[in-house]
Image: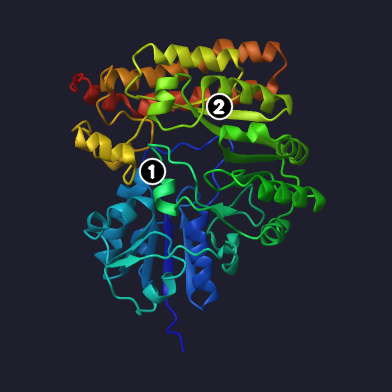
Amino acid sequence: MIDMKNILFISPKSEYYHPSLLGPPPLSGLLLLATILRDKGHYVRFIDEIIKTPDYNNIDDVDFVLISSMGSTVKRAYFLSKLFKNKGIKVVLGGIHVSFLPNEALNFCNQVVVGEAEEVIADVVEGKIKSKIVQGVRSDDLGKYPMPDYSLVEGIKKNPDVIGVTTSRGCPFECKFCSLSPFFGRKLRSVPTDKIINYLLQFKGIKKLHFHEANFTVDKKRAIELLKKMKENEIFPKKALSLQSIDVASNDKILKLMSEISDFYLLIGFESINQAALDFYNKKQTPEMIRKSIKKIHDYDIKIMGNFVFGSDTDDKSIFQKIVDFCSYSEIDIPGFDCLTPFIGTSLRKELEAQNRIFCNDWDFYDMQHAVFYPKKMSPLDLQEGLISAYEKFYSTRNIIYDLMRLKISQSVSTFYMKNYYKILIEKNDSYLDYLQGIPTRS
């Protein structure tokens, strides 16, 4: 007989959070754990702070609080953990950040789950596992788990505007600044295609669909099968978003299916147009490959959200204008600009720590929008101001007018949205820019 527990799940929101253009769905990994425990008979509440933030001071009738977070949300997770722990309620933390720093997290909670939690979470809340640091298990059979139940999310619509689905875990690449491969492993593990289709069919008229994985089409055969079945079952989201490597451009079948299924946006980590920087990031691509992939993807009328990272050891202050110019003449639809960030668990972190080049370990600023280390060829302030200038120059009023004159209405709307985004970014970072004034260039 299971001793039923009252369990509160919380997906915390960063202080510096600003909604993305296509809107964020609830955190699917945490929602999956909530679904697993609900199916085992436990009473579950699920709070996504982006959707709803209750008065936690009035929540006392729970046995466990389970919180998952990443770098930029972990301080919020720690605050909530301490709040509930002080009430005598057991708190379990999980997620990428605490998986690499479990001893830090134990200062705020009762237990930490390291890695993937599906195989151990029931035993944790039922008291069968009492270790303070609980080692999760990577399962090769993702099909045995239920799909996340959106009805558990408090405050969400019955038919949500934004749906997220994780179709696989693992990434074969080893980008220097990415923590996904160290966390999920390099071996690709997939959810059965029919299970995904049946899940998506429960939602009527999907407005926005996010594929939640590091590289949606890394297994091209599987991607083609899934996209074909979406088409056969008339699953046509108004907009769809997936994270990709540039090799998606090498497969016409995938691009054709994407163009037939939805107004597709591909979030591609181009990172740089400088070969030395690409080599530094351990990206297996060249500037020429990037240019060709952009043209090929655009040939299928698929939009590109191209990300660029500033701050490699080869970058100097000229890089910002070069990237903005490249985005303009290559007509990348929605470029994203990031500061190189030494996330916990990455090889970049180890390298910069060994060189004593990290000056900020305030996790709130680990959102890829803040300079937290000493670049080699510029100061941290140069890096921060260069990031802001890239947004200002590309997402300008002039470009909005230019897009309207060319009757690119959706593009002008995107530019206007991003113009407002960087305005908020600047407003929230006035004090950080002041802080960086006192951080010198390191030779």
| Rendered image quadrant of residue 372 | top left
The answer to whether residue 226 is left or right of residue 32 is: right
The residue tagged 2 is 417
The answer to whether residue 188 is left or right of residue 347 is: right
| Residue ID at (62%, 26%) | 293
Q: Residue 236 or 260: which is nearer the viewer?
A: 260
- Vertical relation: 38 (above or below) 215: below
Q: Position of residue 431 (x, y in %)?
A: 27, 27
**What is the number of the mark on residue 128?**
none
Disc 1 secondary structure class: loop
The CA distance from mark 1 to mark 2 is 20 Å
Amino acid type for the residue under numbered disc 1 = Ser
Q: Callout 2 environment at 10 Å: few (<14), some (14 to 19), or many (20+)?
A: some
The residue tagged 1 is 14
- Vertical relation: 20 (above or below) 228: above
Amino acid type for the residue under numbered disc 2 = Tyr
